[in-house]
Image: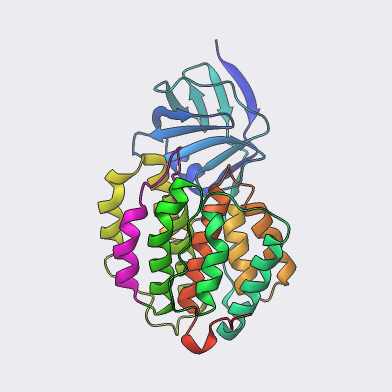
Amino acid sequence: MTLSLGNVPIMGEAARDWLSQGQSGKVLAAVTHTTYLLTEDQELIWLATAECPKHRRCIQWPAALPRLAVGSTFTVRSRSVALESGINLDFSASHAWEAPALSVENVIKITQLPEKLLTVIESLLTKETPVGMGILIRPILEIAKKQVCSIGLQPENILTRSAWPIIERIARDCLIHDLPAVLQHAEALVGLGEGLTPSGDDFLGGLFFARVLLLCSYPQINYLGFSNLPEWIDAAQPRTNLISFALLKDNITGHALEPLNSLGLALMTNQPVECATSAASDLIQVGHSTGWSLLAGFLVGILLAFPDELCIAPS
């Protein structure tokens, strides 16, 4: 029996493009609010509720779908996704969501970035308690304030404790603009953690997305090139799962979750600080700790724009 659930209201532009070509595939994974589909072309798409953040791969549905069996199939016919369970999702009239692009005309001066970033992060930390890699945000800020000695942080969480020495080195690498060292140390974070998106991948996703925005905003920065970045990420694929790898690779190429994209645009343009703070607040709501880990990585990535004379002065 086929059960038509009506029209898909919103779907990411990439998901719409791929499915419009006519695809078949299978259910790769299913969790409480999200079902991950893998097309025959090995592209990842997910079905999620409206509360989940928008993304170029995401199909948003007003309510949770019945749990779909992993390995069950789907087929696209006449701009409808026909699931093996009998559910039919019509996307012929859906709105294709695409992340707003950065307007270079509105980009703030690079000298304004440190103070604006510090204001956003400090405002957030006065109201929220970090989890995941977010626990490392305060010591990362201390590094930005030019403490030359090791902070010697010992977080209670085993995962965060093991990640901190690596992240500390990466943050210092960013401050001295040593990108080859960033890549070298980043290898140890790929796949580090549990779940569909390990915290190490989320952190790196935030970092590399920040780099993309810096490249777009400040073309005068001539040290942001990673000539071997495509080869690096492809070599990293076996160390993490397919879902996390797809998200990490998207972040590296400038395709982020909506709240991370909004934070980056608000921070780097003439939007008020309150807009960036609001976007950061939305970001940390993603997953249990995913948003915090993305934010921590994004903070470290922005350190790439901090020439020595522009680093935040110690308080």
Residue 175 horizontal/vertical position (percent) = 44, 77
**Residue 43 showing in the rendered view:** no
Residue positioned 59% across, 83% down in the render: 313
Is 106 above or below relative to 131?
Answer: below
* Residue in the picture at 58% in, 49% down: 131
Residue 39 sits in quarter: top left
Q: Is residue 83 magenta?
A: no
- Residue at the spot 43% in from the left edge and 59% down from the top edge: 164
- For this rendering, which residue is in front, 76 or 280? 280
Q: Does residue 150 lie above or below 233 as drawn?
A: below
Between 219 and 300, the one lying in front of the other is 300
In the displayed structure image, the side of residue 206 where residue 125 appears, left or right: right
Q: Is residue 1 left or right of residue 278?
A: left
Furthest residue to the top?
1
Asked if residue 183 lies in the magenta stretch, the reply is: yes
Residue 307: % across, % down:
47, 85
Quadrant in which the N terminus appears:
top right
Q: Nearer the viewer, residue 202 or 263?
A: 202
The residues colored magenta run 178-199
Where is residue 198 drawn, in percent x and y?
Answer: 44, 45
Picture residue at 50% right of the left edge, 24% below the top: 82
